[in-house]
Amino acid sequence: MLEGLSTSQLEGRLKNAAADFLQQRLIVPKIFLDAAWPDYRRTDVLAMDRAGAGDIHVVEVKTSLQAIMDVVSELMLVPAHYKYLATFESSGLPPVNESLLYAPDGMGRIGLIAVTERPDDRSLRARMVIAPERFRLQDKYWKEVDTFLASPRQTSKSAIGNTLLSRMAGAS
């Protein structure tokens, strides 16, 4: 079912599945794809709960479990309350050494999201395989969160969706 797509197309599908998963779990989420996040390169999915005033959730997507395990140490450095890795369930998901997912200081665990494609309509379904645990977030990052949210270069997935919907409504 997923054959024939490039790695970037597969990762794009994973990003959307992870964003939709967080959209359903959070209260008034602001969700960003490929966001430039403080002290980190780009993050695949960034979600801020309670319209930016709540917890920060970050998801890294990879098309294979090995690629996911390679990014765990980098993800530990990302300033966020909750951190996740997402991959396709068809990539095998052998037992993960869970001890690698815990923060070195003992506060926080990276969650694992498995994504499957439904055969009937080819839509994606994400499910939690390992639930995340809350990481510490230093106070200094809240000012950076405010700066990030005020940046005109950042557009949330919901803002993009609303723009597309209004354009589509105008076309009919």
Image: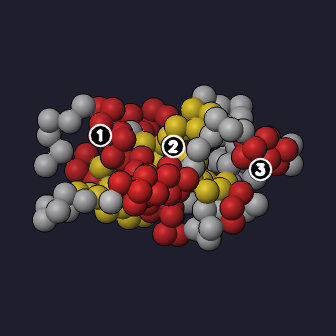
Q: Residue at x 30, y 37 (%)?
A: 9
Tell me if mark 3 has few (under 14), some (14-19) or many (20+) residues whose alpha carbon lies within 10 angstroms of its own.
some
Looking at the rendered structure, the kind of residue marked 3 is Leu
Residue 28 position (above or below residue 151): below
Spatial separation of the CA atoms under disc 1 and disc 3:
31 Å
Give the mark toward the camera: 1 or 2.
2
Which of the two labelled residues, at mark 1 and mark 2, occupies the earlier sequence position? 1
Image side of residue 31 versus residue 20, left or right: right
- Where residue 26 appears, as percent x and y from the top left, is 58, 68
Residue 52 image point, x, y percent: 71, 57
Q: Amino acid at mark 1?
A: Leu
> In the image, 121: left or right of 50?
left
Earlier sequence position, callout 1 versus callout 3 = 1
Residue pointed to by mark 2: 33
Residue 34, how many percent across, how many down? 52, 37
In the rendered image, is residue 158 in sight?
A: yes
- Residue situated furthest top in the rendering: 41
Distance (Cα) linking label 1 and label 2: 14 Å
Q: Residue at x 22, y 50 (%)?
A: 90
Q: Nearer the viewer, residue 22 or 95?
A: 22
Q: Residues within 10 Å of mark 1 (few under 14, many from 20)?
A: some
